[in-house]
Image (cartoon, coloured by chain):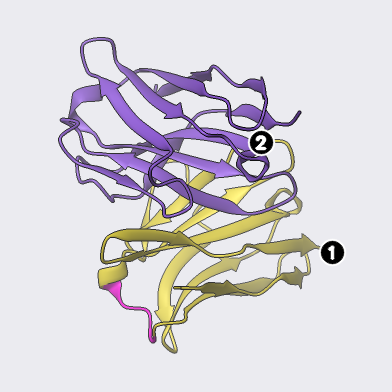
Amino acid sequence: EVQLVESGGGLVQPGGSLRLSCAASGFTFSSYAMIWVRQAPGKGLEWVSGISNSGGSTYNADSVKGRFTISRDNSKNTLYLQMDSLRAEDTAVYYCAKAQSKTLLAGPSDWGQGTLVIVSS
Amino acid sequence: QTVVTQEPSLTVSPGGTVTLTCDSSTGAVTSGQSPSWFQQKPGQAPRTLIYDTRNKYSWTPARFSGSLLGGKAALTLSGAQPEDEAEYYCLLSYSGARVFGGGTKLTVL
């Protein structure tokens, strides 16, 4: 059974940083691309970042480009999202998702339960 | 900026059939855009129902089906159940990007 457990969310001041982690189990982590998707309170889903199975290719949405960095440690079966220069509009639940394949922009198949990030002074 | 449009809300009677659509601001949706569909209930994480236009996962109820219809991606629910009341999102692929639709709130009433 695929399990994805996010951690690292919390309250941070505008301009601050936070690192999210996603611990994966139940599948061969190194064979699949991984994705971060977020959902602002009462709003829809937004594709934030994606990373290929090897970590060699990454994608960031324009809204986070230059501020967020996605990475992975295949030896630890863990996905990360480093979030810098945080803004109020980054407040959201952040979901980790396993992609359907190793391809960078493959869609999500399995989802974690999410971690809440609140950016506020 | 690419916009993916869904019906804001739809209502279906129990046992009835309803089709949700997903439209692209760039033109007709194609299978090459790998349409996916997701279900989200209040307070829960999304769940993937359909990928690559019409493919299902082992957990996808048989009453859900995906297709292309009139230049849009479509999700058809045949034989709606009370537990199908949820928000539904589509996802389309563009060169170098993936874009979610705004979601359809489906009421079973």
Chain letter for mark 1, please.
B
Residue A115 seen in render: yes
Give the color of chain B as drawn: yellow
Q: Secondary structure at mark 2?
A: loop
Q: Quadrant of the C terminus of chain A?
A: top right
Q: Residue at x 61, y 44 (%)?
A: A39
Give the camera-side residue of A68 and B49.
A68
- What is the crowding at mark 1: few (fewer than 14 residues within 10 Å), some, or many (at least 20)? few
Q: Which mark is residue B44?
A: 2
Q: Measured from the top left, where is residue A35 in percent x and y?
A: 38, 38
Q: Secondary structure at mark 1?
A: loop
Q: Which chain is purple?
A: A
B93 on left or right of A20: left
**Amino acid identity at mark 2:** Gln
Residue A28 seen in render: no
SS assignment for the magenta stretch, majority = loop
Q: In the picture, residue B1 is in which quadrant?
A: bottom left
Q: Residue at x 38, y 23 (%)?
A: A80
- Magenta stretch, residue numbers: B27-31
Which residue was labeled with disc 1?
B109
Q: Residue at x 57, y 51 (%)?
A: A45
Q: In the picture, residue A79 is in which quadrant?
A: top left
User: Which numbered disc, 1 or 2, marks the residue closer to the eye?
Assistant: 2
Magenta stretch containing residue A53, yes or no?
no
Q: CA distance from mark 1 to mark 2?
A: 21 Å
A7 on left or right of B71: right
Residue farthest along the right direction in this orientation:
B109
